[in-house]
Amino acid sequence: MKIGIFGGSFNPPHNGHVNSLTTVQKKMGFDLIHIIPNSQNPLKIPMEGPSNEHRLELVRQAFSTYGKSFQVNACELNRGGKSYTIDTVKELLKEYKSSELYLIIGADNFESFSQWKDYKKLLELVNIVVIICLGYQIPESESEWPDYLTSYVAESDFGTLELNTGRSVEFITLNDLDISSSELRKKLRIGRPAEKFLPLAVEGYIKEHGLYRTGSSKISNFKNFTDFCAQILFDKKGIAVKAFDIQSVSSSSDYTLIASGTSTRHTTSMAENLVKAVKDEFNVYPLGVEGVDEGRWVVVDYGALIVHVFYDFVRQEYRLEDLWKNGTEIKLSDKALK
């Protein structure tokens, strides 16, 4: 048997997920693919969104018409806490052999695979299938392999690497759909059309249960919330922190906050500290976070407030303040300015 394993947040599951897995299933000849919603990706900042129960049902709805080759597996949700692939693989090995298991990952995860818990053990326990989409190419020579993988490659042929662990890495090129989960969530939140991005059953379930449309009821005054967030950025040595009321110029948010860091590391640290401080004070996670890995431009989305944290020279390049010149700059409190 050939058994695929595909995990993710599925927040929400969209046509890109369906297209990827149905294509890989056909090209690889998988007998079964376990589709596994995670509880919490340990490498990503937690976000607000549907409950685990809703996410699980959304994935079931997404693949409900594709037959028995696609099985939704709730093992990581049932386990709770941070979701580590090594734990899931060990659980599946109680039923399958190592030679039968194929972990399906995107090219971005393939490049950063060494950050995964016990990644060396994973290279011993499972085969890897790497989905190559827009912006990536199949590595054709040793110089293009990720550094962590070089010592494991026994043989290479175009599209396949045989590892000295007895496992393999195979590359599948897809004409994938260009769908950003964060942009999709934003469309759903503000009521913009998203039908072409979602399986019909997923769209219906989201509408029926009012998912993604609810803002945070835990934040009663977003102007005061903006001031609170500005204070957190000041406390972490944010540069030129400015806030704007953009209700007259934006349909997707009411306020925006912008700050600069002295380095990409400083920028990422400020954004992560902001998320933690808001969680501690308001018990709210952001609706979305982008750019943390690179740290050049991090966007933290709280719905009515969007926070932009820049590496300073990138901020000068994009000059976002010019976009809000018809908005109103908010005078921040003395407490925030200290």
Image (spheres, grey):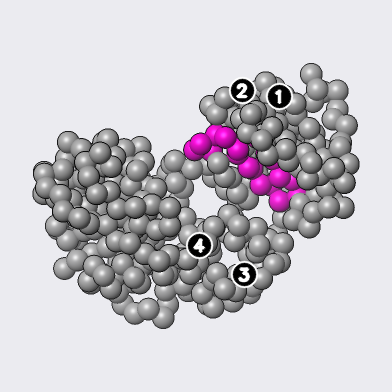
Q: Earlier in the sequence, mark 2 or mark 1?
A: 1
Alpha-carbon span between mark 4 and mark 2: 33 Å
Q: Secondary structure at mark 3?
A: loop
Alpha-carbon span between mark 2 and mark 3: 38 Å
The answer to the question of whether label 2 and label 3 lie on touching residues, with beta carbons closer than 8 A, is: no
In this view, the residue in front, 276 or 197, is 197
Amino acid type of the residue tagged 3 in the rendering: Ala
Q: Secondary structure at mark 4?
A: loop
Amino acid type of the residue tagged 2 in the rendering: Thr
Q: Residue 193: x percent and y percent? A: 66, 71
Alpha-carbon span between mark 4 and mark 1: 34 Å
Decide whether residue 301 is among the magenta residues.
yes
Amino acid type of the residue tagged 4 in the rendering: Asp
Q: Residue 195: x percent and y percent? A: 60, 74
Q: Which residue is mark 3?
A: 194
- Is 291 on the left-hand or right-hand side of 156? right
Amino acid type of the residue tagged 1 in the rendering: Ile
Magenta segment: 292-309
Decide whether residue 174 is among the magenta residues.
no
**What mark, if any, has residue 178 been given in the picture?**
4
| Residue 78 in view here | no
